[in-house]
Structure formats: C-alpha cells, structure tokens
Image (cartoon, rainbow, N blue to C red):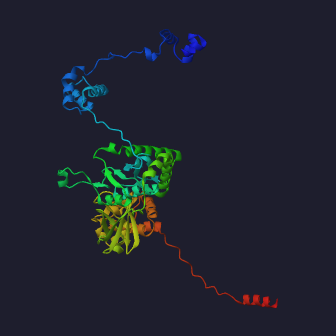
Amino acid sequence: MEERSKCGKVGLAAAKADVHRNTATKYLKAGRLPSEIAVPRTWRTRKDPFEEHWEAEILPRLVDAPELEALMLLELLIERHPGHYELAHLRTLQRRIREWRAQYGPPKEIFFAQEHRPGEAMQTDFTWATELGITIAGEPFPHMLCHPVLPYSNWEWATICHSESIMALRKGVQAAVFRLGKVPQWHQTDNSTGATHRPSAEETAEGERRKFNADYEALMRHLGMKPRTIEIAKKNQNGDVEALNGALKRRLAQHLAMRGSRDFDSVYEYEKWLECVLEKANRLREARLKEELAVMAELRVSALPEYREYRDVTVSSWSTIRVLKNSYSVPSRLIGEPVMVRAYDDRLSVFYMGKHQMDVERLLGENKHRINYRHVIWWLVRKPGAFPRYRYREEMFPTVTFRKAYDRLCEQLTESSADLNYLRILHLAASTMENEVELALQVFLEQGQRPMFDDVKALVAPEKPSVPALTPLAPDLTTYDKLLACGGEA
C-alpha cells in the first residue's frame, strides 16, 4: 500500500514488496492488512486419531491419575489396539492432554515474584563446571564452582572446588565477603551436606527439618551472618543463584571461545583467569552494588583457615593413615608415629613435629584408598612374596604401560620370577625417573620382547664410562721465579 501510494502502479509496488501481483491486488481491493483479513480456524484439517478411544480409555485414566504422561498412555493404546496407533501419534496426544489439563486438570503451583532488599542476603550454591571442558596442562579437569551471589545487585563470585564440603563452602563464602569487605544479614544455601545434616529418627518423627552443621553455624557466627536454608526439593527458593549458575557458565564459555583455548598451564592460572572474568562482569553491577554496600555490616574479623585439622593420626604398619573414612599412604619412616593432617577441599597436607611431609589429592566418598608406590616399593621389593595378595596391589601399576609389562612377564615367566622382575622395575622407576622407565617398557612391548629388569635398567641407566687413570700434574714453579726476577730488574 505504501509503495502504491508512491508510484501509483500495482505491478511495481508488488515487486518492491516482494509479493505476487494478484496477492497485492487482493489486499489493495480489501483495504486491510493480511492480519486483519485472517479469521481463526475452527475446523480440523485431519481426523483426530484418538477420537475413538479418548472418552472410553484415555480420559478416565487422566481423571484418576492426572500425572500420567502421554507416552505411557500411548504405549498402553499401542498394546491394546495393534496397528491402530504408533509413536508418530505422540505429539498429537501430548497436545490433547495439555489442552485437557489446562481446562479440567488440577491447579498448578503458583510462584510469587519476590522483591529483593539491598544487602539483606547472600545466596550460595554449587554448580558443576566440568561441561566447560577445561584442561590443565592437557589433562581433563573435572571440578565445581562455589558460587555466592547478592540477589539485589546480582554481584557474584566463584571459587574452584571439588565437592560440596564445608571446606569448599568456607572457602567460597569467605572469598566473596572478604572481597566485598562487608556482610549481609542472612546467608542462604540449599540443603547440601556442607551446611546441613539429616535429623535423627526421633527428630524426623517429630517433623524436624534438616539441621545446620556445627561447623557451618560457627562460620556464620564468625562472619556475622544468620544462616537460613530452602525447603527440600524447592530449588525455586534459591532461584536467583540457580539462574545465575547458568548465566555464569555461559559467560565463561564465551570468554573461553574468545581466548581460543580451554587449556591452562596450572590451576593457579585458571583461577586468575576466572577472577578476571568475574571482575569484568561485576563492573556492570556497581550502581546497585553501592546500594547494598551502604546498608551491609562491616567485616571486622580475619579469615578462618580453609582446612580442618586432625591431630594424632597414627601411621599404621601398612604405612597408611585413615582420614575422613579413606586411606592414604605415607613414607614408611613415619610408621608408628602420630602425624597431623590438614584436610582442604582438594588435598591433604601431612605434618610431623610441625614440619610438612607431603601433600596428596583428597579422595571424595568413603572407603577408598590412594597408595603411592614410592612409599612401599622399597620394602615390597625385599618381600616379593607379599605382592600377589597385597591388598593395594592394583595401585602398584602407575600407568597402563606398567600393567602391560607385568602381564607380558607373567605370560613368559613363573609367577614368582615375574613378580620379582616387575618389582625391581618399579623400584627402578621410584629411584630414577618414572617416565624414562615407562618409555623403556614401551620399547620392549612394541618390539614384542620380554621386559626383564636387567635389560630395562641397561636402557634407562646405562653404565657410566670409567674414568681413565691420569698422571698427576707436577707444576714447574721456576717459570714464575724467572718472571718475578725480570719484574724486579725493571
């Protein structure tokens, strides 16, 4: 119509509007827009495939159990009426059931939008970040993020962690509040095991909810916040941080795409990169953050340690300690001695007489073990008969190559001879370089040869050439005397 008013020609106006001349003529004669001409369709374009059994079979079941899904009902119809229905009818049945529920189904839960008050609360949640595909020095890095958020301004922070433990929660919350320098009145979290625990059977019978852990309550008292949690299975009550979990990971994915690589040299480098991304995001929230900071309380305490100490942990005769229901090996020189262990979220640090002895990656779960072959091989090579039934035998194969080498020895030697050769090879790896021993084993395996200890040792640590005997040097000092004499005459 606009183009027609400019040029006065129907054909030219139709061409500029990219419609057929006949279509343009129809709309010009009607004098109305296409949306004004269209009328709602009240008829079906095809026969309803469920018309025959809707009233008799489908509807009664929906009335009795409104939660039934369309797929379950369709499978029942396919079973009862072979050849009449197929999976291609699923979308049609889903649409019919959705329309019935909207008209006659039970009431749906209503969620009430809440107004957030500046500085009232901080919400914290854990979210898996493994989907980002982060690698450290080329190795996959499965991890989580502890994600505190101020709902009013959407200011957020995040720290790397590996579980929803109290240590991870302490690290994440403290990192956020010490960066802000202030604390809100409340701290809200879900019912994670880091913050809460199940009530006893008697308390459950009395209707008691999950209770806060003593360590979590101590953290809140120390920081000056009041703890509160959400109802069980009510994630919507933590809706702001739940929504920002997805937004944060999308933001990180975008920055990773701009970076051009998802690999970092170290966890420290990844942490610094994460902090830079969060700082950029928080600059966009500074106006509302100032409103929050104006009403929040000053933070006047120092940070609590990000670990839990376990004192007087005795090293067993197996050269192991048991911490948090898991076992770890330690150097055998500590057998029978009490050690102190600091349990971080991601690692354990072992101390003896106040001096640091070792760090080991912390295990998640219960009744697991982490045995370092270097701690036991020095004695195991002296007692090879203990190897076949050693409880932690599988931990004596640091890589697949070592396992293949042992299997090759077992195929061609007796059990005792294979064990002795393999343990000596493992001893060689502990006393030299594991990767060099592994390369030597690969050479033997690729050539189809038996990796005997003496041959592996010759390849890894060849004998040093002997130093030939040299005649002792006898310096002649008369030359220096002549030089001094000439200097005196001058």
Q: Is residue 111 above or below residue 168?
A: above
Considering depth in this image, is 259 or 471 the residue closer to the camera? 259
The x and y percentages for residue 377 are 36, 69
Considering depth in this image, is 39 or 414 the residue closer to the camera? 39
Considering depth in this image, is 124 or 378 the residue closer to the camera? 124
Which residue is located at x 32 percent, y 17 percent? 44
Q: Is residue 259 above or below residue 65?
A: below
Is there any visible trace of residue 105 in the rendered image? yes
Which quarter shows the C terminus?
A: bottom right
User: In the figure, residue 200 lies in which quadrant?
Assistant: bottom left
User: In the figure, residue 182 lies in which quadrant?
Assistant: bottom left
The x and y percentages for residue 288 are 47, 46
Which residue is located at x 36 percent, y 75 percent? 333
Residue, far front: 295
Q: How many numbered badges does the structure rendering display?
A: 0
Q: Is residue 306 above or below residue 318?
A: above
The x and y percentages for residue 199 are 22, 54
Which quarter shows the N terminus?
A: top right
